[in-house]
Image: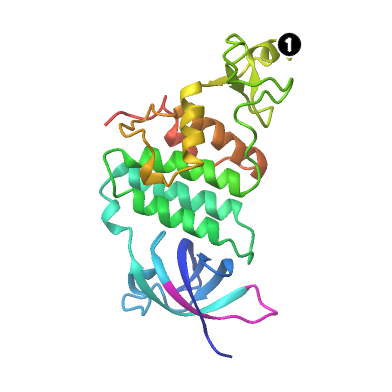
Amino acid sequence: MPARVSEALILRTYPLKEADLVVSFLTRDQGKLRGVAKRARRPKSAFGAGLERLSHVRMSFYQRETRELVNLDSCELIHSQFDLVSDYWAAVALDYFAEVSEQLLPFAEPNEKFFRLLLAVLDSLHHGEHAAWRAVAYFSLWAVRLSGWLPELNVCLSCGILLDDPESPGQARAYFSRSRTGLVCGHCRGALNIGNAWELSAASRTIAQEMLRLPVTQISQTAWSPDTAADLRRFLIQQIESHSERRLITAPLFNAERAFHA
């Protein structure tokens, strides 16, 4: 059986037997796959550093129709994320990208848009101070949108009022909670007795709309910090956790309340 070769991003590895690794990886053309890398844990492994988290590689593998796991033959390293390890928040962002991708992506369903999203945010981590906060917000927004879970950001889910309507300043404020999938206005928040809710500010909604139009490195907001669009990150993470029915291990690190300021 001839080997298949595909561009791929490594999502996760875990040990198998004494010297092997099970590798979860996202290919550009075949979606997320899992395979066995024989003897990959040995010091002189032919895979080298190619199986590190979110390494961009050219993967060669054999696939049989009756088996879920493919056999990994080799991988050629295109780009490593090793230079980001010294930046704590960039390293946490890498863990977050990998965890969300592993949870959201179905097995063996091509999704080149998600592949290109990962490449874009990985590249953006190298541009600008505190780039991790911008990259996490951008990735979360597009991961939710590509999964088909992004609600309208300018409409109250309950009454349908435009949240950006200047003629209704009291109702234009937007709120979200874990118990609802979208945004509600101030009036509906009270009418529905939604107690444990957070506000999604107009500024963060503006950033989100810009992110839906522009590449991550062209976002006009340049002075990113742990507080920038923190409410947007919380909202998007709640959407991911609600639809995937699983709490993200890395998500609490990006809550502004828990993040230390560099």
Residue pictured at 55% horizontal, 31% vertical: 235
Which residue, as the protein is rendered here, is positioned at the far front?
167
SS for callout 1: helix
On the image, the x and y values in percent for residue 199 come to 55, 19
Would residue 148 be counted in the magenta stretch?
A: no
Q: Is residue 12 left or right of residue 67?
A: left
Give the answer, above or below, for where 171 lies relative to 218. Answer: above
On the image, the x and y values in percent for residue 223 come to 30, 31
Residue pictured at 68% horizontal, 80% vertical: 65
Mark 1 surroundings: few (<14), some (14-19) or many (≥20) residues within 10 A: few
Residue pictured at 33% horizontal, 41% vertical: 131
Q: Is residue 35 left or right of residue 258?
A: right
Residue pictured at 29% horizontal, 51% vertical: 85
The span shown in magenta is 58-68
Which image quadrant is residue 172 in?
top right
Give the answer, above or below, for where 165 lies relative to 239. Answer: above
Give the answer, above or below, for where 191 lies relative to 77. Answer: above
Task: Report the amino acid beneath label 1.
Answer: Ala
Give the answer, above or below, for where 181 lies relative to 145. Answer: above
The C terminus lies in quadrant:
top left
Figure coloring: rainbow
Q: Nearer the viewer, residue 18 or 251?
A: 251
Count of numbered marks: 1
Q: Is residue 128 left or right of residue 25?
A: left
Q: Nearer the viewer, residue 106 or 71?
A: 106
The N terminus lies in quadrant:
bottom right
On the image, the x and y values in percent for residue 133 come to 38, 37
| Residue highlighted by disc 1 | 191
Would residue 64 be counted in the magenta stretch?
A: yes
On the image, the x and y values in percent for residue 182 come to 66, 30
Q: Is residue 211 left or right of residue 152?
A: left
Q: Nearer the viewer, residue 35 or 100?
A: 100
